[in-house]
Every structure is written in structure tokens, then in C-alpha cells.
Amino acid sequence: MDLKNIIKYLVFLGLGVLILTLMWNSQSASYLEQCTQDGLTADQCSLFDRILSDFKSVNWFWILLVLIIYMVSNVFRSWRWQQLLKPLDHQPSFLNCMGTLMLGYFANLGVPRSGEFIRAGAISKYENIPVEQSFATIVIGRIVDVLMLLLIIGLAFLLSYDIFVSYFEQNFNIPASKVLLGFGVLAALGLIGLGVLKYIFGLPDEGQSPFFVKIKNLMKSFVEGLGSISKVENKTLFWLYSFGIWFCYYLMTYLCFYAFEPTAHLTPIAGLIVFVFGTLGIVFPSPGGMGSYHFLVTQALIILGLSSIDSFSFAMILYFSIQLFGNIVFGLISLVVLPIINK
């Protein structure tokens, strides 16, 4: 790893730790205030003990089910990856696709966004695929994931419009008309952005700055990546896999509600809201979404009426169950098994 990447890693790691530390301090203060009102002393109000107690109260049947669904989503992603590689005359084994995928997730816990490179390099090594081709298919998969996420965000807003409006009115004193105006402005900016992109694509490279040309080429690659999906043999199956991946992600959040008593009453739409917030937290380039995931999931549950302490506990439970336990265990298994099956 060169100096630039080391600095980038330390910056995002520091941000993740900072967010999590600030959240912990804030939750500790809130919990202490609550205990004081209940007539308890500071010695009886350890946030660590409260979180530990919440973990002990979890129904582990639901956590196990969530982990199984998580692995089902990875099966769908592996099958979809095989579809993307087949038009390039490569037919990697399912086990190699699945194993290198888990290696990538494991790597992301250490160095954000390194997993894609690890995954591309590993599948290239085990299946004799040029690394630029394997990486291109990973990028295409990520482009599709971005489109799916945007659709899910739009769906969450449409289905829970009143919740979002109420939240902005109560916490930021922003009326519903301004919320709608804000989304209208965003939509208009999106249309303007599409027009600007179309204009940029038509400009020649000659006489332009290297930075401009690089951005232009990146945007062209994005568009071309979407176009390359047309080469997939069974497009219906490809999109079914993509839908299956994100439906599993949603179920992981919603079913985890039943594992924790304070969230067991929440509705499927509530699960969609928390899922969207949590996904945006994972997108933030801290190691495994550390800090950012906890903050956004906690905020989503507060919107839904839970106390900040219960919301923070749920974020910790879901994060440690999937992001740490799931990815570490299956990542280590893949690290051991892949060299054995590819002797």
C-alpha cells in the first residue's frame, strides 16, 4: 500500500472512530440522564453494561436466520457475477466466485473499498482471468447496485412520506412544502445534470485538461458498463438476481427487528426506512461503515419513535452480527478454503 492510500485509509478510519466515539459519549450522557430521573446512581448506569444486557436479551434464532439470508444474497451475487463473466468467455466455478466475494467483504473491514481489488485479483488468480476483465464485471455489478439503491430510496420516500415530513417539521422546523420543494429542486438538478453530461460527452479530448478528460472517461465507462449488460444471455435472470440481492438485504434488517424486543413491533415499511439509512451508512468509506452505519440506523429508529438508547443498541446488534461476525467468519473460511480447492 502506497503512502497516499495509507493516508486515505487513516483519514476514513479516523472519521469512523470519531463518529462512533461521539455517538457513544452522547448515548452515555443520555443514558445517565435517564437513570438520574429514575433515581439511580451513576455507578448503576454504565452504557457498556446496558449494551451488553441488550445483546444477552437477543433472540438468536432471528440472528441466525438473518445470517442465512445474508449468505443467500451472496449466492445471488455470485450467480450474477458468473453471468457477467460468461460473455467474456470465462466460466468460473461457483465456489471461487463465492469465496473471492467473501474475501472482498473481509478486506473491506480493514481497508475501505479495497475489497473490489482483492476480489478481482483473487478470481483472476484462481480462474486465470485477466484482472482488468474481472474488475470491469465488478464495476458493472456495482453500477447496477447503485441503480437498485436509488429505486429503493425513492420507494421508501413514497411509502413513508408522512414520517419524513413529520421528522423534518419536528426536528428542523421545516414545513412539508419546503421538503417537497427540496426534492423538486433535486429532481430539476438531476435533469440539468443529464443535459450537462450529454454535452460533455460530445466535447473532443483535444485541448482539455487531463482532469477533465479523466472525469469524462469515467462517466463514459459508467454508461458503457450499463450497456454491457445487454451481452448477458438471460437478462431476466440477471435482474431477478439483482432484485434478490437487495430483497435479502432488506429482509436482513426487517427480520432483525424480531430479535430485539424494543423493535419487534415495527412494520415492514419501518424496516425499509432503517434499511435505506443503514445502507447509506455502509456506503460511507469508513472500515465496514463503522460509525456512519451506527449513526444513520440510530437516527432512523429515532424517527420511528424509539428511544435513542434502544436505537443505538439495535444498530450495534445488527452491525456486529453481520458486518463483523458474518464477514469475518466467512472471510476467514474463504481465506483457508480457496487455496485448498484450487491446488
Image (spheres, rainbow, N blue to C red):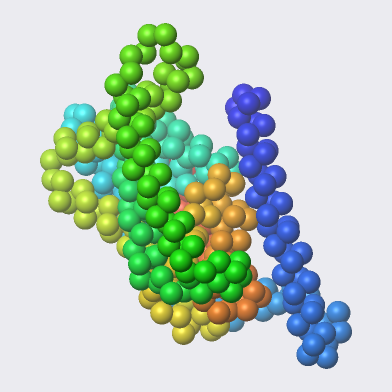
Question: Which of the 4 quarters of the picture holds residue 314?
Answer: bottom right
Of residue 138 and residue 68, the one placed in the foreground of this image is 138
Q: Position of residue 222 (x, y in %)?
A: 33, 33
Residue at x-position 27% and y-position 30%? 224
The quarter of the rendered structure image containing the N terminus is top right
Question: Which of the 4 quarters of the picture holds residue 48?
Answer: bottom right
Of residue 6 and residue 268, the one placed in the foreground of this image is 268
Q: Position of residue 257 (x, y in %)?
A: 47, 76
The quarter of the rendered structure image containing the C terminus is top left
- Is residue 155 in sight in this rendering? yes
Q: Position of residue 81 (x, y in %)?
A: 28, 42
- Is residue 132 in sight in this rendering? no
As drawn, the residue found furthest toward the left would be 233
Q: In this rendering, would 89 be left or right of 1?
A: left
Of residue 73 and residue 191, the one placed in the foreground of this image is 191
How many numbered marks have been drawn onto this rendered protein structure? 0
As drawn, the residue found furthest toward the top would be 207
Residue at x-position 21% and y-position 29%? 88
Is 329 located above or below residue 127 in the figure?
A: below
Q: Position of residue 133 (x, y in %)?
A: 31, 27
Residue at x-position 13% and y-position 45%? 234
Is 220 located above or below residue 101 in the figure?
A: above
Q: In this rendering, would 126 be left or right of 311?
A: left
Of residue 342 and residue 296, the one placed in the foreground of this image is 296
Residue at x-position 58% and y-position 79%? 306
Question: Which of the 4 quarters of the picture holds residue 132?
Answer: top left
Q: In this rendering, would 230 be left or right of 282?
A: left
